[in-house]
Image (spheres, grey):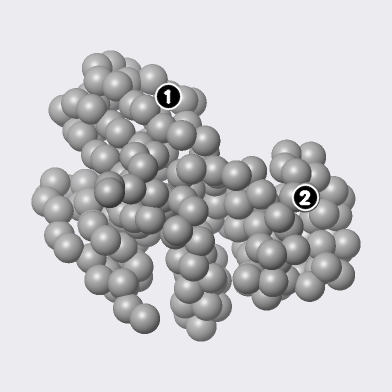
Amino acid sequence: MKEERVLSIENLSFSYEGKALLYRDFSLELRRGECVAIVGPSGSGKSTLFELIAGNLHPEKGRIYHGRIGWVFQDPYSSFHPSYSVESQIADVASREGAEERMEALALEPAMLKKLPHELSGGQLQRCSILRALLMEPDLLLCDEPTSALDNITQLETMKLLMQFLDRVGILLITHDMDLARWSSDRIVDLCSEEWSDGRRCA
């Protein structure tokens, strides 16, 4: 039995006004349980693709279908308001149902959520960001360079924590780190070469 499709992009074309096409007849499908990495240099359209999926930009041609979206951003400090506790900001957008199970999986203590964002390390706050996204019960997680603001050890730890939820979601990952893309993803989309390559998820 095939896993549920959580994202389908069909023959997408898009350009900014007065600019060359970033996408021409671009198609992509993602199912629950899969991680697909989007790679390419700055300006190749990685973040634009996420904005198109989120509906903040509109394609010139083609269609995008997706389930409920959760978003994990590059810089956890800019994704939380500095003046309010992490807990209150999560409660603004998501239910606490299932929070204890997810917090345990993410190695988050309840006391951490009572703190202001600047009182947590980058790795701790990014785990809070993942928690917030998961509590929104998404079908699709858009992860925009989710580990690039972290040190190398914390990058790997955070990505391992994120990957354990693949039984519940599909993950679309933007990264400039090809090693991370190869380790974490089932498929890699290089926006420059437009070639697909098999990824490898290690234990």
**Is residue 122 rendered to the left or right of residue 92?**
left
Residue 19 seen in the figure: no
Label 2 vs 1, first from the N-terminus: 1
Up the image or down, 176 lies above or below 71; here it is below
Up the image or down, 81 lies above or below 164; here it is above
Up the image or down, 203 lies above or below 89; here it is below
- The structure residue drawn at horizontal position 20% and vertical position 52%, both measured from the top left corner, is 190
In depth, the one of 105 and 130 nearer the eye is: 105
Residue 104 seen in the figure: yes
**Amino acid at dot 1:** Leu
**Amino acid at dot 2:** Arg
**Tag of residue 99:** none
- The structure residue drawn at horizontal position 69% and vertical position 71%, both measured from the top left corner, is 104
Residue 39, image x and y in percent? 28, 55
Per the image, label 2 sits on a secondary structure element best described as loop
Nearest to the eye among marks 2 and 1: give it. Answer: 2
**Which of the 4 image quarters holds residue 75?**
bottom right
Q: Quadrant of the C terminus?
A: bottom left
Per the image, label 1 sits on a secondary structure element best described as loop
Q: Which residue is mark 1?
A: 57
Residue 4, image x and y in percent? 36, 42
**Furthest-front residue in view?**
1
Residue 177, image x and y in percent? 34, 67
**Tag of residue 96:** 2
Q: CA distance from mark 2 to mark 1?
A: 31 Å
